[in-house]
Image: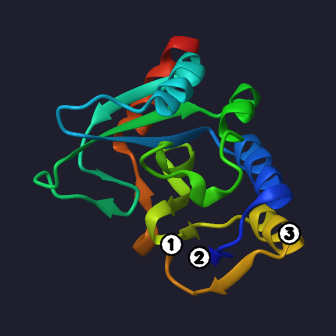
Amino acid sequence: MFELEKSLDNEKYIKFIEFALNTSDFFMLVYCKKKHEGFKRSMKTIKRGLSDLKVMSQFRFSWADTIMSPYCGFEYQVCFYRSDSSALHHLLSAKSLFEWDWPLLPQDLCFYRMSHCWFYSVSHERMAIVTAPTQQDITFFKQLDIISNEKSYSIEKWSIEEKWLTDYLASANRCNQ
C-alpha cells in the first residue's frame, strides 16, 4: 500500500487517468448534494456524459474507506462505471485528482479491478491511496515519481470490496456463455 503525492495534477494527472482506465474494470464517483436540493449543473453534465458506462448507482452513506453520517444534511449518490477510454474526456474535466470535490464536481474518484478497490481518493482530505499495488502499478507510479509514503500492510486489512460487483461480474459471465 502506498500514498500518492498531493500534487497529482497536469501531465501526471492525465497519465494517471489513462493508466487507471486501462488497468481497471470499473471506476466510481460520488455525487454529493444538500438534502432537498438538486445536483449542480457541472455534476449533471458529467453524469450525463458517463451514463452509457454506468453499471450501478445508489444513494448511500459509505464508499471506499469513507463513512458519512446520515444526519449530515447531505445525500450521496455513489455511481459505478465501466472503465473505458470513452470516459477519459469526462475524467479530465478536473485538472487534478483533488479537484474531484463538492460543490462543483463529484468527489472521491476510485478505481476497481474486478470487485476490489485498488485505488481510492478522499478529495476533501487530499488523500490518494493505492491499496493493493501490482508490479505494473509500482513501476508506473515510480516512473511518475509520485509515491509519497509506502507502507507495509497486509492486503486483507486494506481490501475494499464491493460485493455487488462480484455478483454483477458472475451474472455477466453467465450471460456471455
C-alpha gap between disc 1 and disc 2: 8 Å
Find residue 134 and report its horizontal and vertical position in percent: 71, 64
Q: Earlier in the sequence, mark 1 or mark 2?
A: 2
Residue for badge 1: 155
C-alpha gap between disc 1 and disc 3: 23 Å
Note whether 134 is above or below 15 in the view shown: below
Residue type at mark 3? Answer: Leu
- Horizontal side of 59 relative to 123 (left or right) equals left
Q: Earlier in the sequence, mark 3 or mark 2?
A: 2
Note whether 109 is above or below 34 in the view shown: below
> Mark number for residue 144?
3
Residue for badge 2: 1
Residue type at mark 1? Answer: Ile
* Residue 173 appears in the picture as rendered: no
Classed neighbour count for the residue bearing mark 1: other residues with Cα under 10 Å, few (<14), some (14–19), many (≥20): few
Element type at mark 2: loop
Q: Quadrant of the N terminus?
A: bottom right
Cβ–Cβ under 8 Å for marks 1 and 2: yes
